[in-house]
Each structure stands twice: as C-alpha cells, then as structure tokens.
Image: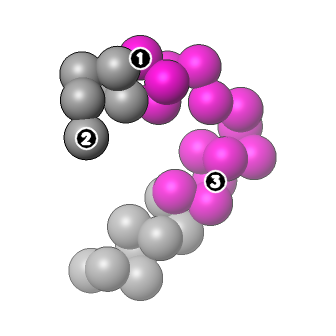
C-alpha cells in the first residue's frame, strides 16, 4: 500500500501482469 508497490508493479513479469489484468476484468 506504499509507493513502492508502484515500482514493484513495473518490475512484475508478464505472467503476473496477465493475472492482474484478469483480476481487473473480473472486478469490472
């Protein structure tokens, strides 16, 4: 919940990114 999360977000792998996108889609 810190600004650090933003940096980590960019450092995440494509796999993780895909999972996050899926999660977002589910949220919508």
Badges 3 and 2: C-beta atoms under 8 Å apart? no
Sequence-wise first label, 1 or 2: 2
Q: Which residue is mark 3?
A: 18
* Alpha-carbon span between mark 1 and mark 2: 12 Å
Q: Main secondary structure of the magenta part?
A: helix
Q: Which residues are magenta?
A: 7-20
Apparent side of residue 7 relative to residue 18 in the rendered image (left or right): left
Between disc 3 and disc 2, whose residue precedes?
2
Position of 1 relative to 24 (above/below): above
Residue 27 vertical position relative to residue 18 in the rendered view, above or below:
below
- Looking at marks 1 and 3 on the same chain, the residue that comes earlier in the sequence is marked by 1
Q: Residues within 10 Å of mark 1 (few under 14, many from 20)?
A: few
Whether residue 11 sits left or right of residue 9 in the image: it is right
The spot of residue 14 in percent (x, y) is 71, 37
The N terminus lies in which quarter of the figure? Answer: top left
* Label placed on residue 1: 2
Nearest-to-viewer mark from 3 and 2? 2
SS at mark 3? Answer: helix
**Residue 7 marker:** 1
26 over 23 or under it: above or below: below
């Amino acid at each position: 919940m810190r600004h650090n999360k933003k940096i980590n977000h960019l450092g995440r792998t494509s796999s993780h990114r895909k999972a996050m996108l899926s999660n977002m889609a589910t949220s919508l």
